[in-house]
Amino acid sequence: MDMTQMFLARHGLMHTRVDGLTEGLTDEQVRGHAHPAANPLAWLLWHIARSEDASVNLLVAAGPQVLDDAWARRLKVVRRDIGEGMTMAEVDQLCETIDLGALPAYWAAVGERTAAVVSALAPGALDTVISPKEFERAIVDEGMLSGPLVSRIQELWAGMTRGRFLMYLPFTHNYEHIGQADLLRGLLGRPGPF
């Protein structure tokens, strides 16, 4: 099994896990804080989807994101970034306005695009280093990142190959947030069946 096959096998399982994270919860529970210092489930689900969309499409494939103007309107979200460094007031605003019905549809569209992109990768593509110009396009032109952490994150990502990035942001990073979501469900008295 090569890296893309492994990614696609785990990617499908990850999407299935995320699909059930709001099951049995009210909109208020999804939008609200299970703990004052924790981001709500709505933010986590949006952030997971945005992280996969931006990283796979802008940096691994060097193409367009799923999030276009139509999706932004449908989600009722004006942000184009992935949410790193948001203040709690910004998190709360996003959670208050995001369309919880559109969020799973966006997540599904992102997953379908990711599977198509990864399936079509040419041999050796994952070994190529993402250029500073490609990072500039994603971060500045497309607005993938904003806020006080931008330069620190740019330094962290510098020199990454497409393969390392594919395993990092849309995969390992997202699984960490799924763990947070599982914890939040527990705090809400609705532990998941995972």
Image: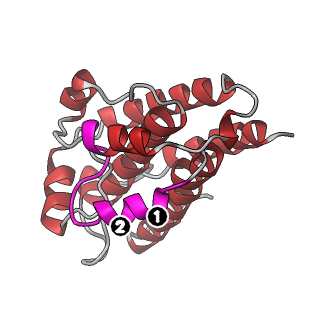
Give the image quarter of residue 76: top left
Figure check: 83 above or below 103: below
Task: Give the structural element (helix, strand or loop) at label 2.
Answer: helix
Instruction: Check residue 148 for magenta coloring.
Output: yes
Residue 87 belongs to the span the image colors magenta: no
Left or right, 141 with respect to 123, comes to left
**Colour style of the rendered protein structure:** secondary structure
> Which amino acid, mark 1?
Leu
Task: From this view, report whether residue 98 is shown above or below residue 108.
Answer: below
Secondary structure under tag 1 reads helix
Question: What residue do we see at 40% from left, 40% from top?
Answer: 133
How far separated are the C-alphas under marks 1 and 2?
Answer: 6 Å
Q: Amino acid at mark 2?
A: Arg
Assess whether mark 2 and mark 1 are in contact (beta carbons under 8 angstroms): yes
Q: Is residue 121 above or below residue 81?
A: above
Residue at coordinates 46% horizontally, 64% vertically from top-left? Answer: 156
* Extent of the magenta region: 140-159
Instruction: Give above or below for 93 relative to 134.
Output: below
Query: Where's residue 19, x and y in %?
Result: 50, 43
Residue 146 position within the rendered picture, expressed as x and y whole percent measured from the top left: 23, 54
Please tell me how crowded label 1 is: few (under 14), some (14-19), or many (20+) other residues with Cα within 10 Å.
Answer: few
Q: Nearer the viewer, residue 18 or 116?
A: 116
From the top left corner, tell me how far across and down residue 95 is, in percent: 21, 53
Q: Which residue is mark 1?
A: 156
Which residue is the site of mark 2? Answer: 152
| Viewer-closest of 134 and 110 | 134
